[in-house]
Structure formats: structure tokens, C-alpha cells
Image (cartoon, rainbow, N blue to C red):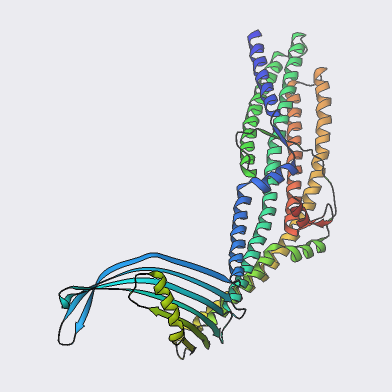
Amino acid sequence: MIIKNRKMLIRILFITISIVSTIQGRVLTYDEAINIALHESYSIKSFQQDKLASQFYFNFYRAMFKPRIDFGLSLPAWNEMVTPIQQPDGLPVYNSTGSMQFSGDLSFTYMLPTGGNLALSSTIYRDNLSAILASQDYKTLKTNKAYSRLGISFNQPIFTANKLRENLREAKYLYEHSSSRFTRSQMDIIYEVTKGFYTLYRATQEVKIANERLKNSQDALKTAQILSENGRIPEVDVLITKVDLAESQANFSESMNILEREKDSFKNLIGLSLDEDIQIMTDLKYEKFDIDMDKAIHSALKYRLELRESNIDIELQKIEVDRAKRFTEFSGNISAYYDFTGVSTIDSRSTQELFYSSFDNFVERRPNRGITMTLSYPIFDWGRGSARVQEQKARLRNSELYLENTKSEIMREVRDIVRSVEETKNRLSIYEQNQQVAELTYRISKMRFESGDINSRELALEQERLSKSQLAYLNAYITYQLTVADLKRKTLWDFENNRSYLENIDEQ
């Protein structure tokens, strides 16, 4: 008996050390867990990068309307090759030609609001040319050339959509869509953290309930041993309390393992290191509030981000319809240029003399200039353009149908969740009363057992009933809290504080 009691004391000491060690971990409240998840979790970081990518995509097309300066250098561009020369009275001969060019380009492009552009550009290069003539016994010729150009050009599409503005509008919609998904992901993360938080809280409370049951079993065994020694209860009752104690110890050990698993899962969810030990802190208090069904539906139809995203999808699809119509539309383009060109091939190796000579050639040579207007219209394409337009219009109609179905689904969800909140609130009130009755009944049964009015089996049944009522209340409380969180997510209205739920998101 002494050995058994010593083993029991060692086990209880081990359990106590385990409990103390867990208490030393980082203590998190519900709000702190939400705040960590909204900054450190994998999900939020992934959606942040997606939103950031869409923002840069939008910035790219917005910058397309601003001027651009380009500069390029070739230092050098060298090549040698064999070139066939056709002869009118014989077979071709093959000369070897070579070029060593140093060049620079500078251009300034101004994007017009109409979708065209006006560009000012300049080019300058020096080219050292050489040729080996096969028809003249491989005689070598060499010369140096300088080239300079300064010009202005204009390009403007006509009778068609402004593609620059269209691309900018598309990029803006995509950015808004990504921002909406990011906000919605925050709400989903808050709900998942809420679920994870209370799941961990359930595991924590189950450890406490199991520990309380273990202590009660230990007290029952001590009482049974005393009563048995005084001859007030049979020895079999002592054996029953020992079995009950062993079962309580096993339940406590199992609940501790479940708690550690839930801790790891929760830490991974909110973005904490698995090596960091944590504890959560909350209470079982809850606030009762009334829910107006009409207001819940109105708020959901006004603020739900899925509807906003569906409207954006419709606008994006309208852009695709406009693009498809271009396969069959009348279009054109106007382009013009005006530039001065100077070329110098004087016999000089001085780069400065060559370029001065090419600049003088600006005045001697007439400017290059031209204007072109092109028009195009597909007379017959065997239905390709029409098929493309009908395809995109069908996709547009599908997007519109999806929007209407989403509205209907949101109304159904809101009706269902409002009813669920009322159901879980009523169930929670019942389980709360049951727990109070079970606690009172157990205290009375314990006193009756100590006075010898009931046996250990009856006390064990009351202990089991108390544990079940505590767990039932705990599960009802968690179900209620999750249902309230889901109500906020689906209506985007905080009925407890009577304000928009999106304000809570912005404050995180």
C-alpha cells in the first residue's frame, strides 16, 4: 500500500510540474491573437503580396501616360562576314566586309491622352568600314563614316478605342478586386483565429476539468479508505474508487496531449514559432443582444465584398467584350515624321572632324519627312470575329447571373446565421443552468458519500455527470461565440456594438 501511494504521489507531482511549466508560457488574449495573425500569419502575408502585385500592375499602366526618356549605347558593334556579289556576265563573287560601329541613341516620348504619342529622338554613330574585293585580287578598301540624326515623330490610332485608358481601367479594377479580396481574407483569418482560439480554449478547459476530476477521485479514494477501515463501506467500494482514479489519470494525460497538439496548430495558424510556449486567457462571460433580421440582410447586401468583387468582374468582362469587337470594327492609324540627317564620309580618322562634317551635312541635305494614314476593315472573316464577340457576351451574362445568385445566397446565409445565433444562445442558457445544477448535485453527493449514505459507484456517476455538464456548457459557449463571429463575417455588422464590422477590421 505504501509503494502504491508513493507511485501515486510521484505521478501527481509530475502532473503538477507539467501544469506549472505550461503556465510559464506566453499569455495571449483573444485580441492579441487576432493582431498577431493579421500581421504574421502565412495567409495574410500571401494576400498582402497578391495585393502588392496588383498595386504595382496598376502603377505600371498609370505610368504609361507619363513621358519616357530612353538612352542606348553600342560600345562597340563589330562584325565581319562574307557577302555574295552578283555579276551580270558571270558567277557571283564573294567579298569580305567588316564594320566596327560606336553609337548612341537618345529619345523622349510623350504619351498623348488620346492614346497616341509624340517622340523626339536623336542618333549618332561612327562606323569604320572595310571590304576585301575578291574580283580585284582581294584588294582591301577602308573608309570611316559618321552619321547623325535628329527628328520628331507622331503616331495616333483612330476610329478605335484608347487602349492606354482601357488598360489603365482594367488594372484599376484588378487592384480594387485584389484589395477587396485582401479585406475579405482578413475577415476570414479573424474567423479562423476565433475558431482556433476557442478550440485551444476548449482543450485548456478540458485539462482543468480533467484535473478537477482527478483531484475529486483522489479525495474520494482517501475518503473510501477511511470509511473502509472503520467498517462503514465494503472493500469493493475502495477498489471501485481506485479504478475511477486510474481512469481519471488516463483522461488527464490524454487531455494534456490534446492541449499540446492544439497549441502547435494554433501557433502555426497565427504565425508564431512552434518552439514558443503559449497560454490563452479569456472567461466564459458572454453578452446577449438582439438581432434585427431586416437590418442584417440590408447590411450584408450593402457591404458584402463578394458583391463588390462580382460587380468588378462584370466591368472587367465588359472590357473583354469591347476588345472582342475590335476583330470586326473599322480602325485606322496616322503616323508622321520629320527629321534631319547628316552623313560624312570624308577621308579622315578624326572622330571630331567626321561628326562636324556630318553636322554640316544637316544644312546641305534636305530633311526626311513623311505622313501615313492607314485604314483597315475586315470584309469577311468567316465568322471568327462574331464568334469571339458572342463568346465574351456569354461570359458577361454568366458574370451577371453569378452576381444575382450571390445576392440570393447571401440572403439565405444571413437568414440561417441569424437563426443559428438565437438557437445557440438559448442552448447556452440551458447548459449554463444544467452546469449549476450538476455542481450543486455533486457537492450534495460528496457530503452524502462522506456520511456513508451512498456508495462510491453513485458518487462516480455524479462525478461523470458533472464533467459532462461542464464540457457541454463549454461546447455550447464556444459554439455560440463562433456563431456570433460568423454573423459578423456574413453581415459585416457588429450587433454587439451597433457599428460596421469593417471598422473593427480597420482598427486591427
Above/below status of 385 relative to 426: below
The residue sitting at 17% across, 75% down in the picture is: 134
Above/below status of 429 relative to 363: above
Query: Residue 468 is drawn in which quadrant?
Result: top right
**Which quarter of the figure is the N terminus placed in?**
top right
The residue sitting at 61% across, 40% down in the picture is: 265
- Kindly give the residue lying farthest to the bottom in the view shown: 379
Residue 397 position within the rendered picture, expressed as x and y whole percent measured from the top left: 61, 76
Above/below status of 264 relative to 193: above
Query: Residue 187 is drawn in which quadrant?
Result: bottom right
- Figure label count: 0
Q: In the displayed structure, does residue 362 sit left or right of residue 347? A: right
The residue sitting at 62% across, 78% down in the picture is: 113
Residue 497 position within the rendered picture, expressed as x and y whole percent measured from the top left: 84, 52
- Along the line of sight, which residue is nearer the eye, 493 or 74? 74
- Along the line of sight, which residue is nearer the eye, 235 or 133? 133
Q: In the displayed structure, does residue 465 sit left or right of residue 138? A: right
The residue sitting at 80% across, 33% down in the picture is: 438
